[in-house]
Amino acid sequence: MSEQKPPGRSDASGAPLILITNDDGITARGIGFLVECMSELGTVVVVAPNSPQSGMGHAITISSPLRLYPSTVFSGLPAYECSGTPADCVKLGKHYVLKDRAPDLVVSGVNHGSNTSVSVLYSGTMSAAIEAAIEGIPAIGFSLNDFSREPDFSHIRDHVQAIARNVLERGLPTGVALNVNFPVRGPEPLKGVKICRQANAKWHEIFDERRDPHGRRYFWLDGEFVNNDTGTDTDEYAIANNYASIVPCQFDLTAYGVMKAMEEWKL
């Protein structure tokens, strides 16, 4: 994996050009908070879904038209709402809205809910960041472990800005995006930030079978989160102990360690 130099300044004013998106929709409080934070670091452009896209993973729209409309959600900022997925938003943001100018940074979130461990694979928030990484653009996905309608973001502001500032100044390796998770605000201040690995944890899924008013069967996904990882260097451990976690992620899923063993297969 080649090293990526700290990005240049794409904006004509000399300020970093920052593209913001999310998966909770353009009216979500998390993206509003992120716009406030990033506006202090550079020139912000928003391209976000016009409706919630949680759990969409890295889906893209290929069998129906994509709609893109100017939005007035953020006064004084260029913003657009898109009918597609978070990955669609990054693609349209770079290739259409910015006319193929690569932003200096793509930030996604702040997601209303955790994206630790295996959730990174399902997350629309992180898929937007990974889409930017595919394009060679430094990217961060931010999530807060708070599923309430009115989450409190005040305890993470300084950390969000510090992480973004470091990426703007130092860059990231090509193909890497940061998965950043914060614990919900508690009685004690956030202890700090830990660089972590992804925990070996997953959902033990249960499909609740139900009937609609017409007697037709449908299913509702439910389950229990199970953490099988006892390590103290994981994202799950960090969040459980009141730290923010940062996991560097990449889109190359190749199991390199298995390749040599497979050479012995009789194919």
Image (tube, rainbow, N blue to C red):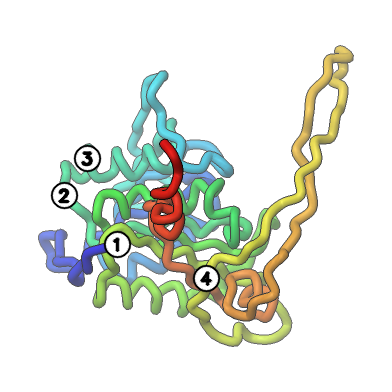
Mark drawn on residue 101: 2
Q: Mark 4: which amino acid?
A: Arg
Distance Cα–Cα, label 3 vs label 1: 16 Å
Lower sequence index among marks 4 and 2 = 2
Looking at the rendered image, the disc whose residue lies closer to the viewer, 3 or 4, is 4
Figure quadrant of residue 260 = bottom left
Mark 1–mark 2 Cα distance, whole angstroms, equals 14 Å
How many numbered discs sit on the rendered protein? Answer: 4
Camera-nearest residue between 237 and 22 = 237
The image shows residue 211, relative to residue 91, as above or below, that is: above
Q: CA distance from mark 1 to mark 4?
A: 19 Å
Please provide percent x and percent y for residue 4. 21, 67
Does residue 77 appear in the picture of this structure?
A: no
Residue marked by disc 3: 95
State which quadrant residue 9 falls in: bottom left
Tell me the kind of residue under disc 1.
Pro
Query: Mark 1 = which residue?
Result: 138
Quarter assignment of residue 17: bottom left
Query: Which residue sits at x=59%, y=73%?
Result: 234
The CA distance from mark 3 to mark 4 is 32 Å
Q: Which mark is residue 197?
A: 4
Left or right, 152 with respect to 263, comes to right
Label 4 vs label 2: CA separation?
32 Å
